[in-house]
Image: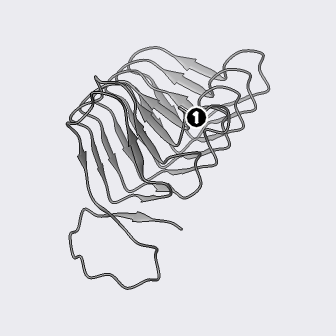
Amino acid sequence: RCTARGNGNGGIAAGNGSLITDCVAAVNTGDGIAPGSGSVIRGCVVTGNVGRGVNAGDACLIENCLIRGNHLSGALLASSSRVVNNSISLNGTFDGQDCGIKVLGHDNWIQGNSEPTNMPYALNLYAATATNNTFVQNLANGGYLTGPGNTINNVAPFVGRLGNAFTNTDPWLNFFSY
């Protein structure tokens, strides 16, 4: 457990294979948490950073975190990572490319996250290399954006607002939050 608050650069930088649990990375000038490949980020609070909330290397696990109010994307993913059961909101207020979760690589699994208020999208499959990513069972606003040349991803359908009746029984659906 640690706290990195108000640093002039990034908050927490960790090497490959790191375990970062129950930490706080807040109001840092750079990224909140920048783990190396194969790292686990669990139960952390990542808020108000000028960079990205979590800037993950390959094959990382980000779970049960609060990632909120970061100026760039809440999470930036390379390849082969899992992002599950997080609350990701109010990220991406700095430029039009950043959002709740921005994906540059391939084979990422994004499931069960609550992303109600990210700008302008919940998910940005940004690069042409962002392929074979899976986005299921998330609560999100704005849907997702696919970058130029990027057509091969597994994004479950989005259905209407919670509280409204719908008839689709697909267990993998994503839900709009507005």
Tell which of 24 and 104 is nearer to you: 104
At 32% across and 81% down in the image, what residue appears? 166
Point out residue 72 in the picture as x, y percentages from the top left corner: 61, 31
Colour mapping: one colour
- Is 20 situated left or right of 111 in this image? right
Tell which of 12 and 126 is nearer to you: 126
Reply above or below: 121 against 149: below
At 80% across and 26% down in the image, what residue appears? 6
Point out residue 76 in the picture as x, y percentages from the top left corner: 47, 30
Point out residue 170 in the picture as x, y percentages from the top left corner: 20, 69
- Is 167 situated left or right of 159 in this image? left
Reply above or below: 15 against 27: above
Amino acid type indicated by mark 1: Gly
Res 139 → quadrant: bottom left
Residue that badge 1 annotates: 96
Tell which of 139 and 124 is nearer to you: 124
Reply above or below: 114 against 98: below
Tell which of 148 and 80 is nearer to you: 148
Residue at the extreme front of the image, as rendered? 148
The N terminus sits in image quarter: top right
At 54% across and 40% down in the image, what residue appears? 99
Res 77 → quadrant: top left
Residue at the extreme bottom of the image, as rendered? 165
Point out residue 174 in the picture as x, y percentages from the top left corner: 35, 61
At 43% across and 53% down in the image, what residue appears? 143
The C terminus sits in image quarter: bottom right
- Is 134 situated left or right of 78 in this image? left
